Amino acid sequence: MSLLSPRKSWLGLLLGSAAFFSAATVQAAEPVLQTEQSDVVTLKPYSPHTILVEDAVYSHNKDGRVDVVDADRGVLLGMVQAAYNPNMVLSPDASHFYVGETTWERGNRGARNDLLAEYDSQTLKLTADEKLPSRALVTPKRNDMAISADGARVYVYQMSPANAVQVVDTKEHKVTHTVEIPGCALAYAWGNAGFSSLCGDGTLSNVSIEADGKASVTHSAAFFAPDKDGIFEQSPSVAKDGSTYFISYSGKVYPTTLSASSVVQPAWSLQEGAGLKPASDATAPFEVTWRPGGWQMSALHKNTHELYVLMHRGTFWTHKDAGTEVWVYNTDTHKRIRRMPLKVASTMVGVTQDASPLMFTTDENGDFFISDARTGKLLRTMKGLGTSLIFTVAPGEG
């Protein structure tokens, strides 16, 4: 062991301090890094796997948004604001998308503005900002708003002062009709100039926009009993040919062709298609079996006639519960052709429309799961994409 005199100790401290300050001086002399520069990127034309994801952001839902996602890479390409219980639709050629939103002049009060915003899909620039008479401030569902098969009309459901649908001309950017649909709700587009709504008496209200500009309304016969076995408003439909698959809480599927005289075919059972007995309705609500449920609980792959449904085990009134599995059905044979357990229960399922489709699910934390729709194999996860992911829209769905 070596001992230093007090004088040598002080000398060592001074030399050490000098070395420290010398090193600090050298570090401070390093060149300053170049500051970040902002730029503007134009996205590529949408591929079948470029999708829109609605995030309602329920924890602070004045700040909703629509995300643009490259599902092949699991990359967020951009986003636009979609304020307070928003809705969205994508144009048939994927060149534009529309966001229905509501704001107030002073944030949480003042003059209310109901808006239909149009965005360029590649630049995300606002190309039109239409003021609406009103819109329904309800939980975002796909059919709160719909778009015609040719993209010329957007249908916006509203409830002020009564149930109605506003028809917006997307070229002229103006509301051309406000069609009252008493006792009915939502909009399921069919063709270039028509939509249908679900009614509280179990019927469909069918609205045609005639060549002379008038709107004519017809009603179907009742096909479901709302007090015993309601219909999921999020049932999938295709505007081009009006094909729709209305799914009931118990798991009945009503194949429907929407038109001025909508045709509803006899229902078939999701459970029977999987080799089980049909599920009970509200008359026997405590029976536990496999049932459909979730927020966006079904999706349709048009070309292969495949219906994707989130399923869980539960009683009748569990229609909002997350699905633990995705069951896939052939809509021609009514048989289950695939059963895909999920690693994490999901309230949403979506699919792309190409020959190698992807499937989308989520969890309560806002993670976004991208899987092979043919096998259910998880391909990639986007952690924390949002907080309240509600539904997806892929090119070609309409």
Image (cartoon, helix red, strand yellow):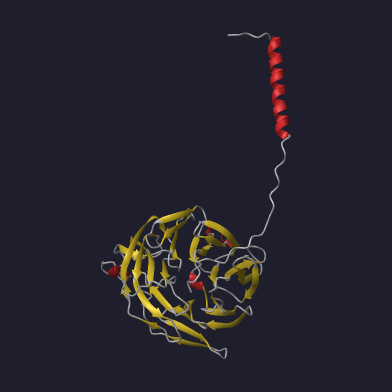
Residue lying at the far bottom of the rendered structure: 212
- Taking the image as drawn, is residue 57 in sight? yes
- Residue 343 in which image quadrant: bottom left
Residue at (57, 65) in percent of width and height: 84
Quick one: 178 or 341, which is closer to the camera? 341
- Taking the image as drawn, is residue 386 in sight? no
- Residue 91 in which image quadrant: bottom right
Residue at (47, 71) in percent of width and height: 397
Quick one: 322 or 147, which is closer to the camera? 147
Where is 229 relative to 206, above or below? Answer: above
In the rendering, at what x and y percent does residue 294 appear? 42, 63
Residue at (69, 25) in percent of width and height: 20
Q: Could you tell whether 98 is left or right of 206 in the image?
A: right
- Residue 299 in which image quadrant: bottom left
Where is 48 relative to 155, above or below? Answer: above
In the rendering, at what x and y percent does residue 3 appear? 62, 8
Where is 183 relative to 139, above or below? Answer: below
Where is 280 relative to 212, above or below? Answer: above
Q: Which of the image's four quarters has the N terminus?
A: top right
In the rendering, at what x and y percent does residue 352 appear? 46, 66
